Amino acid sequence: MSVPIFGQIYRGYPIALVVFLSTGLSVGMAQYAFGEFSGPLKEEFGWSQTQLNLSLAFSFISGILAPFVGNLSDRIGIRPVMFVSLLLIALGFLMRPFITELWHWYLFSSLVFAGFPGATIMPAGKMVGLWFPKTRGRVMGAVVAGNNFGGVTMPPLAAAIISTLSWQVAYVTFGLIMALLAAVAIFVIAEDQDKIEAEMKRTGRGDQAQIARVAAKAGITVRQALTNRNFWLIMIGLVAATFTYQGVLTQLRQHFEESGFAPAVATSAVSIIAGMGIASKLAFGRASEKITARIATIISVALQAVGVFIIAQADAGLLMWVGIFIFGIGFGGLGALIVLVVQEAFGMKEFGGIMGLMQVGMIASGTGAPLLAGSLHDSTGSFDSSMLIVVAIFIVGIVALALARPVRVEPDEG
């Protein structure tokens, strides 16, 4: 009798770990650690905050590519898509030390964002949905907590390397880590339905095998989604919610320092938000199984709105930390809830394609938010105004999600 490669360990666990690292390190390096490189880049090249932030607006590339990446993952599987995506991110980081012109910065930022759909939200949605159909919410929370792991570890890593060596070495380090992860993913990731069911039975999860098969076929098609009112309401809600990533998160490190925090304290505050997000994702993931992912998302965005409002109004002191705490509680859960809302509303049948369309809508937040933040910062000297605008956008998203209703997702009998 042959011994399975993972012994008595359920294969879903190492797969979940790889996805945890893929989504977490991608987000940690490109978003959480962004502020650590802002000062050195502006000092060396003389770029303005608007010019630097414009690279974040190139996240529209993720939105444009997402439907194709999602459709491709539905057709050929997530493993090859994930492998290539991680290599693109690695290349984007490895090439950054060679920049001499602003357009080089934009080009290599584009490579990173081109790899994002296939390295973050797609593998998280596909792998958790297939390997953990019975506990999807709590496992999704744990997997997407990788974002916060990246947020806790990558800014301090970048800061340490930049202060002791250089920003160039920091980016090379990031690139090598992602290239290694790509190699690991090609050996670990698996999604064949028969193998999943066999693995469930081998490890005493036979009761989940039928659930997994039904879940894999349940849902509506991309065409059906496009003609459904709730698809558009959910898209508006999620697009509004994601203004938090490029409009708030990537600016927080600099905002805290400008508000009176010492540089080390500013870095620590961002890491604290990331650390809080781990517990938040677990809590919101579990809550989504009880109160639905849609309601949980409304609560998440509402908490962020309150937190950002306080952060925008406060100087360094107790009130700022109150805002950080409230924002951190709500912000953390969002990464898991975005995927869970789409799965809950539209099923797994064509999850990749539908999730890809959602990300097209997120071009508005990915492109508009950093430009808004950068231009208002250059004109006013702070991020306060842009953060208050994001709060108003959050409110619009809450209303849209409140108006949305569940979509009936029956399994395909074919």
Image: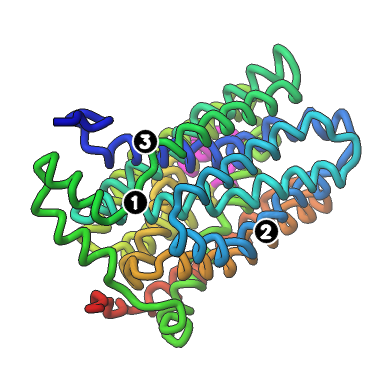
Numbered disc 1: secondary structure = loop
| Disc nearer the start of the sequence (1/3) | 3
Are discs 3 and 2 less than 8 Å apart at CB? no
Q: Is residue 403 above or below residue 291?
A: below
Q: Which residue is mark 2?
A: 61
User: Which kind of residue does numbered mark 1 sit on?
Assistant: Glu
Decide if residue 50 is on the left or right side of residue 174.
Answer: right
Residue 138 in the magenta stretch? The answer is no
Work out whether residue 66 or residue 5 is closer to the camera in this orientation and state it: 5
Q: Which segment is the magenta one?
A: 311-323
At label 1, counting other C-alpha atoms closer than 10 Å, the crowd grade (few under 14, some 14-19, many 20 or more) is some
Identify which residue is drawn at 42% across, 53% down. Answer: 334
Numbered disc 3: secondary structure = helix
* Separation of residues labelled 3 and 2 (CA atoms): 27 Å
Decide if residue 263 is on the left or right side of residue 296.
Answer: right
Q: Which residue is mark 1?
A: 191
User: Which kind of residue does numbered mark 3 sit on?
Assistant: Leu
Nearer the observer: mark 1 or 3; the answer is 1
The image shows a total of numbered marks equal to 3
Identify which residue is drawn at 72% across, 50% down. Answer: 110
- The percent coordinates of residue 310 (x first, y second) are 53, 49
Quarter containing the N terminus:
top left
Q: Is residue 237 above or below residue 57?
A: below
Identify which residue is drawn at 70% across, 39% down. Answer: 92
The colouring scheme, among rainbow, by chain, secondary structure or one colour, is rainbow
At label 3, counting other C-alpha atoms closer than 10 Å, the crowd grade (few under 14, some 14-19, many 20 or more) is some
Decide if residue 388 is on the left or right side of residue 13.
Answer: right
